[in-house]
Amino acid sequence: MELLDAFKWRYATKKYDPAKKVDQELVDKIVEATRIAPTSSGLQPFEVFVISNQEIKNKIVPIAYGQEIVADCSHLLVFAAWDNYTAERIDNIYALTTTGREQPADRYKDYTDRLKSMYLDRPAEVNFAHTARQAYIAFAFAIAEAASLHVDTTPMEGFLNEDLDKLLNLNEKGLKSVTILPIGYRDEANDWLVNLKKVRNPKEKFITEIA
């Protein structure tokens, strides 16, 4: 399927068929799309939690304001961003980079020093806002890859972040939840949105061309 056609096919699924599970091979592809997504300075300042445990999904339902799609979906992806930048986190990523590229360990020292000078003196909440934006890039990649595989998704921000962080022990890992993504297969007979027309702003209002 052409990617644009896949985007036109997908919608924010409102009812999942809990009996239909996404094959692990497809889940792996969706998650891999998040792993290889671009991020600012290649820092990849977030992690993705893939939850298929039904008990955990059930516990997240009240955290997500009672939205049953969290329990009924096949897998729930949780995107959790670094709570702050640290010298160690920056150095670890670039140590991985130089090792993977078989480069000298100090190859990017000037650059990492500049990153540290930019980030380390900023308030933690400013840095978290930045890491969260990077997580959203990967979030979009997951939605796109799922659509290309004809796997349904529901982008969600409607949940109590601090409660989810506590449930998943994210604070202990220096992480904060940003957004969640149920994946699975639509229950066409019971999803009120499935047959409604996708409506967006017209091109003439949405796009401004500057030649």
Image (cartoon, rainbow, N blue to C red):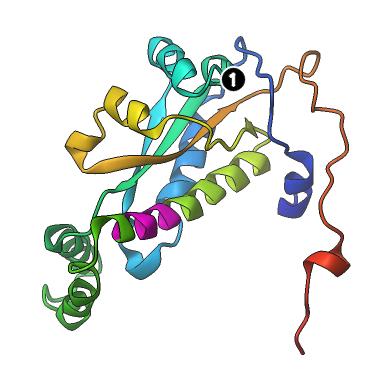
**SS for dot 1:** helix
Judge whether 2 appears above or below 112 on screen. Answer: above
Total labels: the figure holds: 1
64 lies above or below 129: above
The answer to which quarter of the image holds residue 148 is top right
Is residue 165 inside the magenta stretch?
no
Amino acid at the residue labelled 1: Ile
Q: Which residue lies at the image location 28% right of the left edge and 26% below the top edge? A: 166
Q: Which residues are magenta?
A: 127-134
Quarter of the image containing the C terminus? bottom right
Residue 92 appears at what percent x and percent y? Answer: 16, 59
- Of residues 14 and 25, the one nearer the viewer is 14
Residue 203, given in percent of the width and then of the height, sits at: 85, 65
Give the residue drawn at x 80%, y 27%: 194
On screen, residue 28 above or below 135: above
85 and 143: which one is in front?
85
Where is mark 1, residue-wise? 69
Q: Main secondary structure of the magenta part?
A: helix
Q: Which residue occupies the foreground of this view, 208 or 47?
A: 208
At horizontal 87% and vertical 69% (from top left) the residue drawn is 204
- Left or right: where 86 falls relative to 63: left
